[in-house]
Image (cartoon, grey):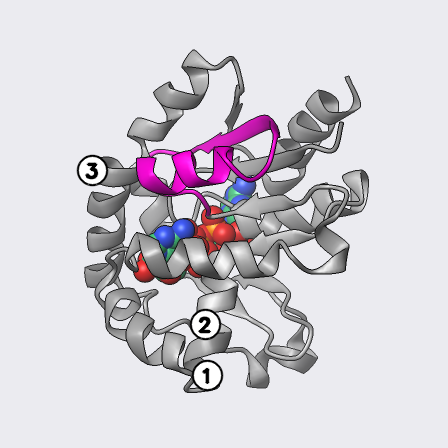
Amino acid sequence: MTTSIVLFGPPGAGKGTQASKISEMTGKPQISTGDMLRIAVSEASDLGAKAQSYMESGILVPDELIIELISNRLKQEDAINGVLFDGFPRTLNQAIALSSIVDISSVISIEVPDEEIIKRIVGRRMDPITKEIYHISFKPAPDEIQGRLIQRKDDNVETVMNRLKTYHQQTSPLSSWYDDQNLLIPIDGNKSIEEVATDISKFLSN
Ligand code: AP5
């Protein structure tokens, strides 16, 4: 049976950082709703225009827009053998919609305390060419690309506080929903990037 994996956790937990490693291990393409929405905003598409203000305030984009985005993405050929969802689902409605279209084999939940999250998000930088995610202290970028690094608009303290509040109110309850279905794999995300990757790969190779 073809199954998909959900990568779950608060903003800045390290989902994007670990997703590329998991994709490599499993061969499943990463589907990040956050990345797809940022592309839509940069292209000034209808979806981008609708999503932008929600994203910049740190609140969730309405379920119907997200479910349509995911349903269309899953029609692409590379999704046929299952995918890795990064940052989706984030509400019970999204989780119920997802369970009606794909089979989920596991929900890898990266757990990180709020105070660590703020440090991670405020120090995050991205290379717009390679899309590699860096951190000013925890994963510094090479000197030669420092000049082109960008910081996300929603990576400021005020928006991070809203994103965390949104996460605790609307998204974290999903962990017990998935736990009740025996799908939840808790991973201690408060370790180095390499240690978290090792813990996830141990689970995946079992
Ligand atoms: P999205 O882009 O999904 O943001 P997010 O969930 O808030 O997650 P992030 O991308 O901020 O963090 P991450 O866990 O990927 O961490 P990363 O690996 O970069 O969503 C943005 C917005 O879009 C939302 O607020 C919402 O408005 C909207 N949206 C998206 N999906 C939606 C949905 N399904 N429904 C409704 N709305 C939706 O790591 C962070 C930093 O920490 C990096 O600098 C990294 O280098 C560093 N780091 C990573 N791991 C470690 C480690 N172990 N130790 C030290 N540093 C580390």
Q: Separation of disc 2 and disc 1 at Cα?
A: 6 Å
Identify the element where label 3 is drawn. helix
The kind of residue on which mark 1 rests is Ser
Pointer 2 or 3: first along the chain: 2
Residue 15 seen: yes
Q: Quadrant of residue 1?
A: top right
Q: Quadrant of residue 83?
A: top right
Neighbourhood count class around disc 3 (C-alpha, 10 Å): few under 14, some 14–19, many 20 upward: few
Identify the element where label 1 is drawn. helix
At 53% from the left and 48% from the top, the residue drawn is: 86
Q: Position of residue 200 (x, y in %)?
A: 66, 29
Neighbourhood count class around disc 1 (C-alpha, 10 Å): few under 14, some 14–19, many 20 upward: few
Q: Position of residue 115 (x, y in %)?
A: 29, 41
Identify the element where label 2 is drawn. helix
Mark 2 near ligand 1 (CB under 8 Å)? yes
Report if the CB atoms under discs 2 and 1 are less than 8 Å apart: yes
Between 134 and 130, the residue placed more toward the observer is 130
Q: Which span of residues is magenta-colored?
A: 88-113
The residue labelled by disc 2 is 38
* Quadrant for the C terminus in the image: top right
Mark 1 near ligand 1 (CB under 8 Å)? no
At 62% from the left and 35% from the top, the residue drawn is: 5
Judge whether 163 appears above or below 149 on screen. Answer: above
The verdict on residue 69 being magenta is: no
The residue labelled by disc 1 is 42
Residue 119: mark: none
Q: Separation of disc 1 and disc 3 at Cα?
A: 28 Å
Would you say 197 lies left or right of 108 here?
right
The verdict on residue 103 being magenta is: yes
Residue 169: mark: 3
Neighbourhood count class around disc 2 (C-alpha, 10 Å): few under 14, some 14–19, many 20 upward: some
